[in-house]
Amino acid sequence: MDVADQAAGSGSHLARLLGFLERDPDNLPLIADAASAALAEGDPEQASGLIGRYAGIAPLPPALVNLQGVVALSENRYEDAAAIFGSLLRGGVGDPGLRFNLAWAKAMLRDYEGASELIDEAVAAASPRAAALKVQALHHLGRLDEALDWGRRLADQRPADTGLMGALAIVALDAEDADLARTYALRAGDAHDGLAALGMLELDQDHVDESLALFDRALAASQNDARAVLGKGLALLVKGDSGQAAELIHRSAGLFGSHLGSWVASGWAYFVNGDQRRAREAFEQALAVDDNFAEAHGGLAVLDVLAGQIESARRRTEIALRLDRNCFSAALAKSLILANQGDAGSAERVLKMALSAPIGPEGKTLAQAMVGFGWGSKGRAGG
């Protein structure tokens, strides 16, 4: 029995195909099958080499060009993948699977408009993750009603699509429809985004320990779920663990990128932890994302009071209240200006007030108020 016969009789499918290729090295269908098997068995480098081997013998057929793109996706080379899939689409290959692959690459490149346009109901029917990706893309674009309407049509047809349910739960959360968010989150099962949504809902009801358990489950499923990282940080802030809370919330802000609420919550967490420099940096980052966000102006006003910069604090407070007359941080800044009149030694009193004294129109403490920035229009989540 030679090597090829031994490979054919044992080992993985890829190993058997490679054994056959030793006997027939220029067999193009065999090379193509081996490339597909290599990718399926988690060896993109081998797959890429086999595709190159095919290309050295004959022009690549569309199926192998597509496989090249899938290899690029698996290696996080999203620009390469988008270029490959785009060339196929322009060449007349327009099957739903290809459109989904291109949509995925575009989403990874933050081209959410392009991703959304590629996914229609035919693509959603052909690719298991396409429906959720469409909802997520529309969410990133801030088109919450459209995302909910589009997803709702498919949700009843696909009750077992936990990815879609999780994506819809997060959109409903940011649309401030708590009942709908809970409905979708419960239908999402163990999907990490559904668990994160449930955690946020529990936290908003001051069920802190229950929320922490849900966030931990979400993070066990996906350690970089930004919403779960943020939620866990907020829950720990409410419990008084400001050190760990600050690091988690700051990490979530980096994961989100443009989520205003997480940058503001990061600023307050650092403030409560006594790090005014990093608090200021976080509030300034929120303004860099959107200089019309009242809470960032208000947070900087509080820090200006502590620094004795009363005129700057008054100016920032006026801006914050002009943008949002119910701005929580502006209410705190205004009370501090009146109470402290620029006393630079008032930091301890400010911290105590921020942690425990009911302030603002809803009578919440700082830690409780920051929970609101984890979801809903206050935080402008964007996915």
Image (spheres, helix red, strand yellow):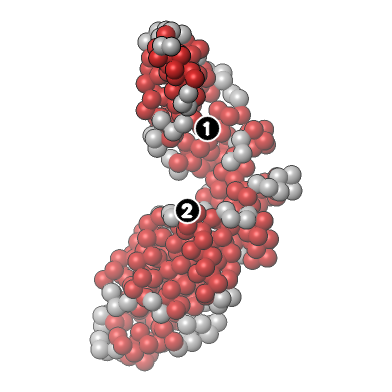
Of the residues shown, which amino acid type is indicated by label 1? Asn
Q: Furthest residue to the front?
A: 1
Q: Nearer the viewer, residue 160 or 37?
A: 37
| Residue 324 x/y as whole percent | 50, 72
Element carrying mark 1: helix
Which residue is at 29% across, 78% downward?
A: 274
Which residue is at 52% across, 50% downward?
A: 140
- Between marks 1 and 2, how big is the CA–CA gap? 22 Å
Q: Nearer the viewer, mark 1 or mark 2?
A: 2
Of the residues shown, which amino acid type is indicated by label 2? Ser
Q: Earlier in the sequence, mark 1 or mark 2?
A: 1
Q: Where is 267 relative to 255, above or below? A: below
Q: Nearer the viewer, residue 368 or 138?
A: 368
Q: Please tell me the numbered disc located at residue 157.
A: none
Which residue is at 49% across, 78% downward?
A: 368
Residue placed under numbered mark 2 in the picture: 222
| Residue 334 x/y as whole percent | 41, 84
Residue placed under numbered mark 1 in the picture: 101
